[in-house]
Amino acid sequence: MSSSPAVPPDLSTDVPEELRRRLRTLKQRYGRQRSEPAGYRLELAVNRRRHQLVEIRKQIAELEQRAKVIESELNGFGKGMAALVLEEIAEYERTFPEAWSPTSVLGFRIWVVEDGRLVGARQVWDSPEFTASCTAHPGSDEVPHTDERCGRLGCGIYATKSLDPLFQLHLRESDRNYAVGLIAMSGKVVEHDDGYRAARAEVVSLVLIGKDREIYTTEPEVIAAIFADLEAALTSEQSRRLTTPILARIEEHLMERKDQSWI
Ligand SMILES: [Zn+2]
């Protein structure tokens, strides 16, 4: 009555229950056959592979788990690196108070009219956008310099924080043929007591005072037209007959745009 050891303990469930039951009955009734049917070897082979498959799936799960651990370690390292970089940037900013300005800084400046063009302290501006360069150290990407390598005043686009120094030192009510503007500075912006030196600037509000005509504008196209061809702008419909007082109206016009610094 005891089952033959040649019979695998667990016949595959792929074999229908009905067949398994009939085989069990025959074995109990007649005992084991003399020759072992090939089917049992097949069954053994199938079972062996099932065990192997289970084993391999277990290993895959373990490897996936290890991969996840390594991934989360890498994430941790990445965050650590970002924290280190932030710390290093903060260290630079502590050591060197001037820093790259993420938002525009607003300031004032003057141009004089020379040969029908607007000229700054040193250079002709033929566009409302200007990028500073260092004549003492051309090609340097640290403009404006702060180590006095290019002289006491240093390179960069100059602007004042308020209109007062411009009005007190450079402009009189009777002056003509000049422009005063509000510029938005970006890139490296170095702050001084009364003003700034910047790597880049764009004119965002402008007053052009000609001989007998004037333009007050915050329109980018009109500002660009003035820098491109001043004489043409002064005879265009954008210009008006010069009226006084000049300085008070310049202040009113430029301050209106400055007070809307979020634009
Ligand atoms: Zn320089």
Image: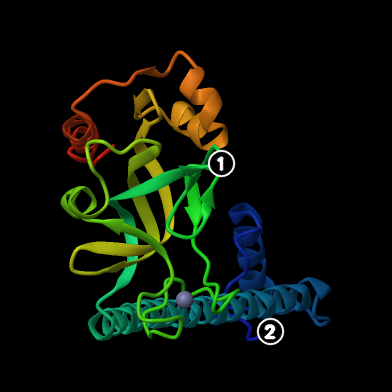
Q: Is residue 175 left or right of residue 200?
A: left
- Where's residue 4, x and y in %? 63, 83
- What's the amino acid at mark 2? Ala
Image point 50% across, 18% down: which residue?
A: 235
| 161 is higher (above) or lower (below) than 142 | above
Q: Residues within 10 Å of mark 2 (few under 14, many from 20)?
A: few
- Which residue is under mark 2? 6
Image point 44% across, 86% down: which residue?
A: 149
- Where's residue 39, x and y in %? 78, 71
Q: Which mark is residue 191?
A: none
Image point 51% across, 37% down: which residue?
A: 227
Q: Is residue 134 left or right of residue 146?
A: right
Q: Residue 41 sits in which quadrant?
A: bottom right
Kind of element beneath mark 2: loop
Front one among 35 and 53: 53
Q: Which mark is residue 115?
A: 1
Kind of element beneath mark 1: loop
